[in-house]
Amino acid sequence: MTQPISPRNEAFLSFVVDHFIETGSPIGSSTLISKYNIKWSPATVRQELNSLMEAGFLTQSHVSSGRFPTEKGINYYVENILNVENSPDFGLQFLENKYEGIDGTLDHVISAASSILSDFTKLAGLAMLPQRNTLRVKSTKLIKMGERECLIFLVFEGGLTEKTYIRLAKPIRDSQVERIGGYLNRLILGLTIEQVRKVVLERIKRTTTEYNEILEKVLRISSELFEKERKAGIFIEGKVSVIESLNFGDSSLYRTIIEILEDQELLSNFLKSVVKDGHSKVFIGSEKGMPRGFSLVAAPYYKGNSYGSLGVFGPTRMNYSKIIPLVNYTAKMVTKRVNGEITE
């Protein structure tokens, strides 16, 4: 935990961070005095800046250059100085209108959230679907499609549905479909995906009945779902925008950003931690486990009893005062949308 600094130190740190976010450039004491109408003497200003450097909040590329914030400094600024409004200031009705025209399926709403976040910030918008691994099966349905074809529906809490087409080795009668469907409901109702795998596997080992072929298909479906959820795919929009936002001469940073955006497991781990903690979080550079030079602002949303998360990813000099309330408000809008509180 970083120790608090004096109000005067906080004021100067705020000036330097604000300038860096606005321009991407360091700031010298003379520019700082004129830009922010500071009444203290140049010597006093330099003394304050030096104390912030000694504390690790500021740095400079060489002795005669201006100062810019370190990741530690930006973290302190966001956690202790920044006054974040509850709602973004660009027009809430406009954001609400964006969601009113979106198709009601969960995938479309969550995908649209990542696009909207990217559109408003010109950075990368991220959104992760609710995790099915923690959800329980609410109902199952087996539908006969042909002599040897069926559709299996697994419906989870919150309305998430997984459907799979299966082809059977032997013909199946209508009476069997009804009987097996009822058996399946009794067997796995109220179980998580992991529990479904264990229960179905144990039942296949113990008995040989007309149910086994269907059970084997359910086992395959649940295993594939479990593996897919473990990897936790996410929607990412605005990859080009975040690359264009970089204002650095070091080409390795461009390679880094591409690698990060292609590494869904890395990003999903941060989004999962937001779901686990149940509140919005800001990850700034290596201070919070992110790759150096980059930040993620994320917030959870929920559908029924299941939680997902969304956020904005970009360089550490992103405009936190606008992005944090935007992400929080978008999470609230998504929650309302997927729970039917916003209608067409």
Image (cartoon, helix red, strand yellow):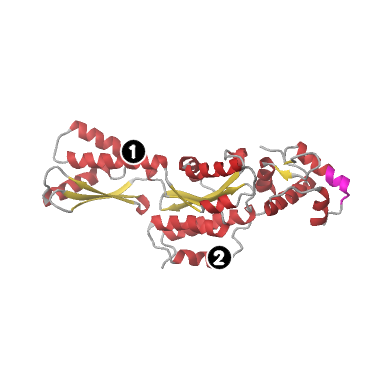
- The x, y position of residue 258, in whole percent, is 52, 44
Magenta region? 40-46
Visible residue check, residue 185: yes
Which labelled disc corresponds to residue 332?
A: none
Q: Gap between marks 2 and 1, in whole Å?
A: 41 Å
Q: Farthest residue in the top direction?
A: 205
Residue 283 visible, this angle: no
Does the magenta stretch mainly form a helix, a strand or a loop? helix
Which corner quadrant holds the C terminus? bottom left
Q: Quadrant of residue 192?
A: top left
Measuring 22% from the left and 35% from the top, which residue is drawn there? 203
Q: Amino acid at mark 1?
A: Glu
Between 1 and 66, the one lying in front of the other is 66
Which quadrant of the view contains residue 294? top right
> x, y (%) of residue 89?
61, 63
Q: Of callouts 2 and 1, which one flags the residue occurring earlier in the amino acid sequence?
A: 2
Q: Which residue is mark 1?
A: 194
Which residue is under mark 2? Answer: 92
**Left or right: 325, with 214 as reference point:** right
Q: Quadrant of the N terminus?
A: top right
Instruction: Judge whether 195 appears above or below 178 on screen.
Output: above
Verify whether residue 94 appears in magenta. no
Label 2 crowd bin: few (<14), some (14–19), many (20+), radius 10 Å: few
- Residue kind at label 2, given as amino acid type: Leu
Element marked by disc 1: helix
Q: Give the residue drawn at x 61%, y 47%.
A: 315
Residue toward you, 252 or 339: 252
Q: Is residue 14 above or below residue 87?
A: above
Where residue 84 sits, quadrant-wise, is bottom right
SS label for mark 2: helix
Answer with left or right where residue 255 lies relative to residue 137.
right
Q: Position of residue 266 (x, y in %)?
A: 49, 40
